[in-house]
Image (cartoon, grey):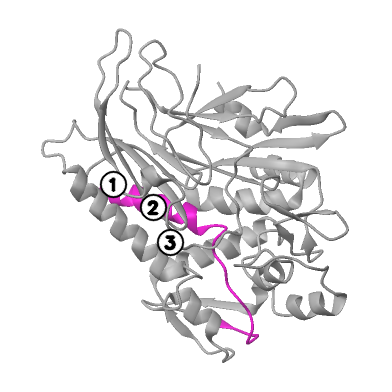
Amino acid sequence: MEFPTLNAARMLAEKPRPRKPRAPAFYVTIRRLKTPNIPIMHLPSAIPALAAALILTLPLGACGKKTSEQTVLQGETMGTTYTVKYLSDDLPNPPAPEAVKKQIDGALEEVNRQMSTYREDSEISRFNQMRETRKPMPVSADFAAVTAEALRLNRLTQGALDVTVGPLVNLWGFGPNKEITREPTQAEIDKAAAQTGTDKIILTQNGKQATLAKTQPETYLDLSSIAKGFGVDKVAGELEKLGINNYLVEIGGELHGKGRNAQGEPWRIGIEQPNIVQGGNTQIVIPLDNRSLATSGDYRIFHVDPQGRRLSHIIDPKTRRPLSHRLASISVVADNATTADGLSTGLFVLGETEALKLAEQQNLAVFLIIRDQNGYRTEMSGAFKKLLH
């Protein structure tokens, strides 16, 4: 049986499966992963069918069970697409789908206005363009909160999640409209690295007005490794403001589920192992009941340099070079999508050994696909195993 897959370009709505009421709401295809360094932006859809947002109401059937009516909203944001599935028939006065979508789009536009590096008028772009050092710049509460979480996860991942690594990403040819034509010199790497490091960011959240400052004029902040997850959380919050408490939200591969689906069961997410994994097409299904899921990986986006070497698009802040380890992908389940998004990037940078070690120490739910001499193998943390039961 064919199942819809989740990737960084598109999310398809689930088809009715009357014979399998416990089928996952979505499948995550690990070989089509979200890319942590993709900047937040609005692009024309590569899929004509999604050029206009869709509002669909789908009645889903299940054997011997009363089903509810599910609404599916789709649209574009942050250079990718979003899908929101929710139930509202338990509400005395359910909001119209058009009104829900308007509220969702407004919330996502606000995230872009704050954190898009592709908008010259965004808060983050104004901060990056600022050359004064130690000059506090007033920022919105949401921008400050996402930055604070990025800094916290930087410490948790031993510096692996670094939202100031943009100059090195650009230097290695993974920035906007750039390609690598030669390996950067050590002098170029050192110059770019001198502007990186979260210690060069000064965040103040005392009182009503948060501020942000930098200690180096060229320091560049990029929250794209965490902001899509925040967008998911923001949409979830908007739904709950409307009284909707049974929903599944997805933006570019990041998900958050709460409550029950149309069959009255927790939302189920299938992580589909790539067909290159030995055995192929093995699915791991986990429930998302007030939980989030995010995945990072590197074997869909990379450069091949003039010497024929494969260069990952993810830069290791410690080596200042593209990653070169055996970890192909990592999926993280957390209480919110902001944390899951940032952790998936940071843990991926650490590599399979350190990522799994940290996951066990911090009780993190992670699922890894690792390259080995026989192709690929999988591992999971103890916290992730508990989700399967």
Of the residues tagged 3 and 1, which is closer to the observer? 3
Q: Answer with left or right where residue 161 lies relative to residue 131.
A: right
Q: Compare residues 11 and 217 and report the one nearer the observer.
A: 11
Q: Which residue is mark 2?
A: 76
Q: Amino acid at mark 3?
A: His
Q: Position of residue 127 (x, y in %)?
A: 51, 80
Q: Answer with left or right where residue 43 lies relative to residue 242.
A: right
Task: State how far apart marks 1 and 2 are (Cα).
Answer: 17 Å
Residue at the bottom extreme, as displayed: 132
Q: Amino acid at mark 1?
A: Leu
For marks 1 and 2 on the same chain, the one whose residue lies earlier in the sequence: 2
Task: State how far apart marks 3 and 1 are (Cα).
Answer: 22 Å
Q: Amino acid at mark 2?
A: Glu
Q: Tell me the crowding category of disc 2: few under 14, some 14 to 19, or many 20 or more residues within 10 angstroms, Cα based.
A: many
Residue at the top extreme, as displayed: 64
Q: Name the residue: 46% across, 63% down.
A: 41
Q: Name the residue: 43% across, 18% down.
A: 22
Q: Are marks 1 and 2 in contact (CB under 8 Å)?
A: no
For marks 3 and 1 on the same chain, the one whose residue lies earlier in the sequence: 3
Q: Which residue is mark 1?
A: 239
- Tell me if residue 367 is in the magenta stretch: no
Q: Name the residue: 53% across, 66% down.
A: 148
Q: Which residues are magenta?
A: 212-240
Q: Which residue is mark 3?
A: 42
